[in-house]
Image (cartoon, grey):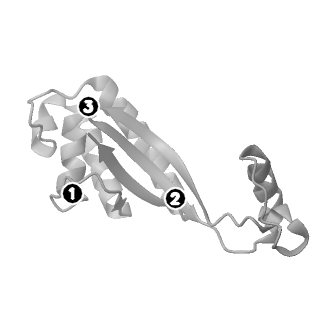
Amino acid sequence: MGLDMYLEAKLHLPPYDTELAPVREAIGKAICYTPPTEKPDNDPTLMEITGVTVRVGYWRKFDPLHQWFVNNVQEGHDDCRPAYVTPDALSELEEQLDQVSDDPESASEHFVSEGDEPMSEGDVDYTLKVVVQAKKLQERGWDIYYRASW
């Protein structure tokens, strides 16, 4: 068992949005949804999609990044619950990753690890790409959440 880490984007969708009817129908078919017979006309579009969740990033055993989220997003609580990531926090993370990318020796200024495991260049580059994508989604109204499991 190890540390699995996720950055997810969630978008709340307004109820009864007629533009979502084809999406509701497609998802209903994909999950074999059958509306209860007591619903009017047994209409498959009555399945209301209230939100969408998309995984933006995934890491395995990247303790320095996990500790950053615990310290900067989760107020020091390492409890495996989803934690909302503010736009300011994502911008700060991006700036710190950029600095580490330019100067790998600076990693210890921003990222701590219980195992003294160094941050690899590949991890930093991948994480920067994830953060840039997450910021774009935030700008379009998505909420970003970090969660980890042990």
Mark 1: amino acid: Asn
33 displayed left or right of 68: right
Q: Nearer the viewer, mark 3 or mark 2?
A: 3
| Quarter occupied by the N terminus | top left
Pointer 3: what residue? Answer: 2
Disc 1 on helix, strand or loop? helix
Disc 2 on helix, strand or loop? strand
Q: Is residue 26 above or below residue 117?
A: below
Tell me the crowding category of disc 3: few under 14, some 14 to 19, or many 20 or more residues within 10 angstroms, Cα based. Answer: few
Indicate the quadrant where residue 39 lies.
Answer: bottom right
The Cα–Cα distance between marks 1 and 2, rounded to whole angstroms, is 20 Å
Q: Tell me residue 148's x, y (percent).
A: 31, 45
Residue at (35, 63) in percent of width and height: 86
Residue at (34, 55) in percent of width and height: 91
22 displayed left or right of 1: right
Tell me the crowding category of disc 2: few under 14, some 14 to 19, or many 20 or more residues within 10 angstroms, Cα based. Answer: some
Residue at (24, 41) in percent of width and height: 65
Pointer 1: what residue? Answer: 72
Pointer 2: what residue? Answer: 10
Q: Tell me residue 136's x, y (percent).
A: 51, 53
Which of marks 1 and 3 precedes in the sequence?
3
Residue at (49, 44) in percent of width and height: 55
> Given contact means CB atoms under 8 Å apart, are the residues at marks 3 and 2 in contact?
no
Q: Nearer the viewer, mark 1 or mark 2?
A: 2
| Quarter occupied by the C terminus | top left
> Given contact means CB atoms under 8 Å apart, are the residues at marks 3 and 1 in contact?
no
